[in-house]
Amino acid sequence: MSVRKLFMFFAVLVAAVFLSTQVMAEPVTINWWHAMKGARGKVVDTMIKAFNDSQSDYVVVGTYKGNYDETVNAGVAAYRAKKQPHILQSFEVGTQTMMLSGAIYPVYKLMKDEGYTIDWKGYLQPVLSYYMNADGDLMSMPFNSSTPVMYYNVDLFKKAGIPMLDKEKPVTWDEMAEITAKLVKSGVKGGLTFGWQSWTQVENYSAMHNIPFASKANGYEGLDCELLINNLTVVNHIAMLKDWMKDGRFFYGGQKFQGPTAEFAAQNAGVYIDSVSQIAKMQATVKDFQWDVAPMPVEAWMTEPQNSIIGGASLWVFKGHNKEDYKGVAAFLKHLATPEMQVYWHRETGYFPITLAAYEQLKKEGYYKEFPYQEVGIKQLTRRDPTKISRGLRLGYFIQIRNIINEELELVWNGTKTPQEAMDSAVKRSNQQLREFEKIYK
Amino acid sequence: MIKRSVFTSRTLPYLLILPQVVVTLTFFYWPAAQGLMQSVMRSDPFGQHSTFIWFSNFTALFKDPLYLKSIGITLLFSTAVAAVSISLGLFIATMANRALKAKAVVRTMLIWPYAVAPAISGILWLFLLHPSYGVVAYAIKRWFGVDWNPVLRGSDAMFMIIMASAWKEISYNFVFFIAGLQAIPKSLIEAAAIDGASPFRRFWTITVPLLSPTLFFVTVMNIIYSFFETFGVVHVMTQGGPGGATNILVYKVYQDGFIGLNLGASSSQSVVLMTLIIVITLLQFKYVEKKVQYTG
């Protein structure tokens, strides 16, 4: 009897051990914290689902953590509490902070460690270059990338007798002066308005004209960089816009996009400069007039304008997880970059496809024949190989610096300061921030 | 004879207050201590590089002309909010105190705005006053020819956030004033009326002095409100702009700390604010508590 009992006991034990290993073979969970809500959030969920359905080793769980600031803060707090997710979406201005944080696992290294050989040449270079370190190694995976373009009201252009704009060759600012003057003359309340002024009128303006925004190759080559935006070209550009305010050729609609978009939609402005990611919104909301997209204007002397720079966010991988988890992270990042996913992402959100393969596929599908305005941004972004100046910006406390530029520009628009005073002050204040930032990492 | 229950245990009272103490320590003292610590450090957001730098954050703060400007803006803003909400609250309370019919209804309706969160109040006012899509903004620009533009002009923006912040505080003040007014004996006012004092004089020489403890209390509460809780209003309506014209202290803490991830600078600003609130609270205890009569 007792032998049988003992046998039973072992049988149960073996069964239990076997069952528990079954439990342990459950798929590994990979957490991704992002800032994509609404329609974009649904697209993200679909991309995650496609990955989860395609294999059984890993389950990616996407969590919306609020806007970009909130998502980054959630990541910071989680890392401090050692509860960090595997992947965190962070906006482009936070790049320097993330890169120096010591908390991240660089993407190029992750992919190499996990045995993926990726041909980075097959990616859109101006997108990658924003997230590379000085040695050209990719630190984070680009995710949602956009660039500013110029929207214009076709109906108002026709009424004012202005010819439609080319989708590849940018108009000059001198031509813009005439266009906006004609618009105002034809009875439109204002000519031009724009959102995100620091990004569109200072950062991108500088990149496209190949003028350094900051020393040390825009901060890529050292924390001891200084801002250079009080140069004559930028100051003259601001002065020109200020001059346009007198007769309504330009009017200020606010720092972000809400005000300017509303003005464009209400046909108070004939021309509106903002991110390509506004296209989806335009398609959905603008019903009572025709609009189109053209590249950003450049100065007449700039016969070969550089690429514009991107905005948006990228995916950072946190340190401190198991080797097994990182296999899944790498597989997931690879999945996101597949042409199918990138084509889907671009079609649904208007953000750029990050690989040339996806871009070629969209061309082949005739997507850009159907929606020619979707290609304006991508062509502007890739019209030339990025230089050390047009590849991006790498500044500490960049959020504060953008704030400072916004503030100083507002002081120009409302007549408190001259363009030169404002830009000098922006440089001085920003340099203080840069020095503070530099001290942290000494 | 009153029946008394006597607990002889010495530990029981401590045990009974323990939950409250634990909550207070974890959610109030611990973060405050962290803030104090952070304010004397220079560190990156991830906490990997921290150096102790004594009071450099504070000296930098008070050397920064923009911080001093922010203090000025905050003082102007909170004084204006307190003045507007107190005077209107008092005015409405006096009116409502007279109305006989529908008194209860009027009172209830007037209390409602207090239930609105500051951020929502900001959004509501923005829909009225935003130069691009505001209904009232459209009307005043169109019919009165006022060049209203809070996106561009600091004074307009300031006016806008004062209105939005004061609006909901009017109801709060109203509640206290109406209670205060009802506590004033009718006989006093009647006697003055018989002596021939005009309604205005009766108000100034009888009602206001008797209402002064309430007035003081409400002032303190309004200042605390405009210093801290108006964050939502500013965040929704102006984000501190244009050109920093509405960058009140509490918003600057948020911008530097939460958005800009400069923990040292924002912690030192929080410490300054914390000191300020301690001073205000002490003043309130010292003066208000003595004067307010608790009856009934």
Image (cartoon, coloured by chain):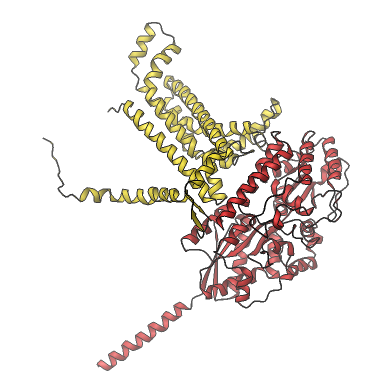
Residue A98: x percent and y percent? 59, 60
Q: Is residue B205 above or below residue B268?
A: above
Q: Nearer the viewer, residue B168 or B231?
A: B231
Q: Is residue A16 above or below residue A429?
A: below
Chain identifier of the yellow chain: B
One can see residue A253 in this view = no
Q: Which of B152 and A388 is in front in this view?
A: A388
Q: In this view, does A339 lie to the left or right of B174?
A: right
Q: Nearer the viewer, residue A333 or A410?
A: A410
Chain identifier of the red chain: A
Q: In this view, does A435 lie to the left or right of B188?
A: right
Residue A186: x percent and y percent? 84, 36
Residue at 63 percent across and 75 percent down: it is: A112
Q: In this view, does A421 lie to the left or right of B263?
A: right
Which quadrant is home to the C terminus of chain A? bottom right
Residue at the outermost left position: B1
Residue A377: x percent and y percent? 77, 57
Q: In this view, does B2 lie to the left or right of A135?
A: left
